[in-house]
Image (spheres, rainbow, N blue to C red):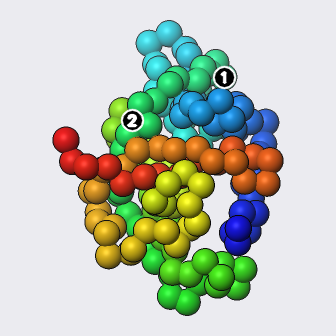
Amino acid sequence: MPGDTLLPPVIDEDGAPFWEYAARGELRVQACAAPGCGELRFPPRPCCPHCRSFDAEWRAMSGRGRIWSYVVPHPPLLDAYAAVAPYNAVLVELADAPRIRLAGHVVAAPDAPLDSVDPARLRIGAPVRIAFTEQAGLTVPRWLLRERA
């Protein structure tokens, strides 16, 4: 499928646990483990920006969120994406961590191509839920539209 390895993520020491949990179908976010802090942070980093502690843990998230922002590039921003245009790029605000926003794509099904959702269906605030799919040996998160509760 075109787009499988177009822009692979860079996995560093701080972010490696995110990808390990994703491979198990879990969305987890780094949190400060210092007593009295507990601030969630993303992207992962070695030190808490609030209390400066180096103690961290990974907390499970519900996998629900809302589209905070999106774009449908015309023409595609990178030549390699031309075969899957029009596609969307979204920022999703997590329901259980509103200050955390994850980048990704809204697709019709976990293994669907990047252009599988009509851009006219996307709206700021639209509810989404996470799905995972394997691409080139790496499990990556994607987003599925869900009905409003």
The quarter holding residue 27 reads top right
- Sequence-wise, the earlier of marks 2 and 1 is 1
The residue that disc 1 covers is 54
Location of mark 2 (residue)? 97
> Does the image show residue 55?
yes
Few, some or many C-alpha atoms within 10 Å of disc 2 (few <14, some 14-19, many ≥20)?
Answer: some
Image-based side of 6 in relation to 18, left or right: right
Q: Amino acid at mark 2?
A: Ala
Element at badge 1?
loop
Instruction: In the rendered view, tell whether residue 94 sits above or below residue 30.
Output: below
Assign a secondary structure to mark 2: strand
How dense is the environment of label 1, judged by Cα within 10 Å: few (below 14), some, or many (20 and up)? Answer: few
Residue 70 coordinates in the image, percent (x, y): 41, 67
- Between residue 37 and residue 60, name the one nearer to us: 60
Q: Residue 13's spot in the image, x, y percent?
A: 79, 36
- The residue drawn where x is 29% and y is 66% is 123
Residue at figure coordinates x 55%, y 51% from the top left: 110
